Amino acid sequence: MNVATRSIVFVSTLNGAPWGGSEELWRVTAQRLTEQGHKVAASVCRWPQPVAQLISLRRAGVSVSERWMATSKLRSWSLRKLVRLIFDPLLCRAYPRVFKRWLSGRKPDLVCISKGWIGEDHGFMELWLAARADYVVVVQAAGEQMWPTDGEAAKLIKFFQKARRVFFVSERNRALLETQLGIEFANAEVVRNPFNVQRSATSPWPATSEPVQLACVARLDPQAKGQDLLLHLLAAEPWRSRPIAVSFYGKGRSEEGLRRLVQRLGLTAKVKFCGHTSEVAEIWANHHALVLPSRFEGLPLVAVEAMLCGRPVIVTDVGGNTEIVEQGITGFIAQAATLPHLNLAMEQAWAQRHNWKVMGKAASQRIRQIMPADPARDFADKLLWLAEKREESRVPAI
């Protein structure tokens, strides 16, 4: 794609964790654009510990600016709450002004705002409504429990209305947000997140069939990922007596709480914590299937990666899961993130466990039909096209 050098700015609103799957699309896209010779800058929340992905971006030539958040360095929930009560009103007034000066200095042709979920704001919504910069929005996750108030909805409608495009990672979340806002998007489009395995990835099937090894790959955050549901299921009969084990991969704000719950439920022989790993294919060399009992999602990368590696997936009917998983063919779908629904899906999966290898092959074929070869390249092309056609490409508002 032959275009002039452009200035593209990425703004991540993620403030609940140093990094997450929601950040991969803008990160990889920023790196691709930099490699193509474009000026790329990024604004993210600051955390006390170094973030490896940001270090990598800086080395690649992306100008990364970190916004200081008063609660970023506080581990105590009570202290975070107290600091928010005292300082958030001040921060919401001060930091948008500081950020506005920073953004003006970048002279962007286009700004890409990456929202992990619609509730992330911290005083920036008014800035975007007043800003002259052209921007697009990526909405990574949505959920029924994220219903906005009338005041929030009014702001969000204006915010999305002004955007050049509103990108979603699943059709389900686009429809859900239209319901929550009571509008219909005319400037929306579905894009895909990049995945962290080769498109040609394969993982050998585990040598032993028992115990059945499940991997739950997700940040340790039950509010979103539902690990507590899985633990309560494993603690009840007949699951407690069955030859089944679960490995939790990931880190998160609720790791200690989940460890205590494992102890309290007497599951130390069935459940292990494996931390974070970037070697995704190696996970599936030792596990038969993915289990992901999420309460809300976008389109989980871990499900895509498991399917690429030839594993069936057991998921809840949230986000875009049913857009990639076929019940009883490539995986199993719990109709809701509740214990009875998860139990039903797990029972269905258990009854067909001897067919999982065949299902895994079907999953690998299906996901390759759905996912583009290079999602970040495709997204970079979209952004450059919008930056090039700043006036001609405008679409009708919501």
Image (cartoon, rainbow, N blue to C red):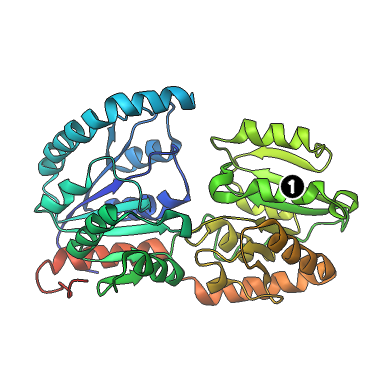
Please state if 323 lies on the left or on the right of 45 as rendered: right
Which residue lies most toward the front here?
150
Q: Report helix, strand or loop for mark 1.
A: helix
Residue placed at 56% from the left, 42% from the top?
221
Image-quadrant location for residue 220: top right
- Residue 165 point in image, percent of width and height: 25, 66
Callout count: 1
- Determine crowd level at label 1: few under 14, some 14-19, many 20+ residues with C-alpha closer than 10 A: some
Image-quadrant location for residue 121: top left
Image-quadrant location for residue 194: bottom left
* Position above or below: 223 against 190: above
Please state if 78 lies on the left or on the right of 288 as rendered: left
Which residue lies most toward the right here?
241
Residue placed at 17% from the left, 47% from the top?
126
Q: In the depicted view, which residue is nearer to us: 185 or 311?
A: 185
Quadrant of the rendering where the C terminus is positioned: bottom left
Please state if 309 lies on the left or on the right of 136 as rendered: right
> Mark 1 — residue?
232
- Give the residue type at disc 1: His
Q: In the depicted view, which residue is nearer to us: 386 or 172?
A: 172
- Residue 326 point in image, percent of width and height: 63, 76
The answer to whether one can see residue 312 in this image is: yes
Residue placed at 74% from the left, 39% from the top?
272
Quadrant of the rendering where the N terminus is positioned: bottom left
* Position above or below: 211 against 63: below
The answer to whether one can see residue 75 in this image is: no
Q: In the depicted view, which residue is nearer to us: 94 or 180?
A: 180
Q: In the depicted view, which residue is nearer to us: 308 or 316?
A: 316
Residue placed at 65% from the left, 72% from the top?
363
Please state if 208 lies on the left or on the right of 252 as rendered: right
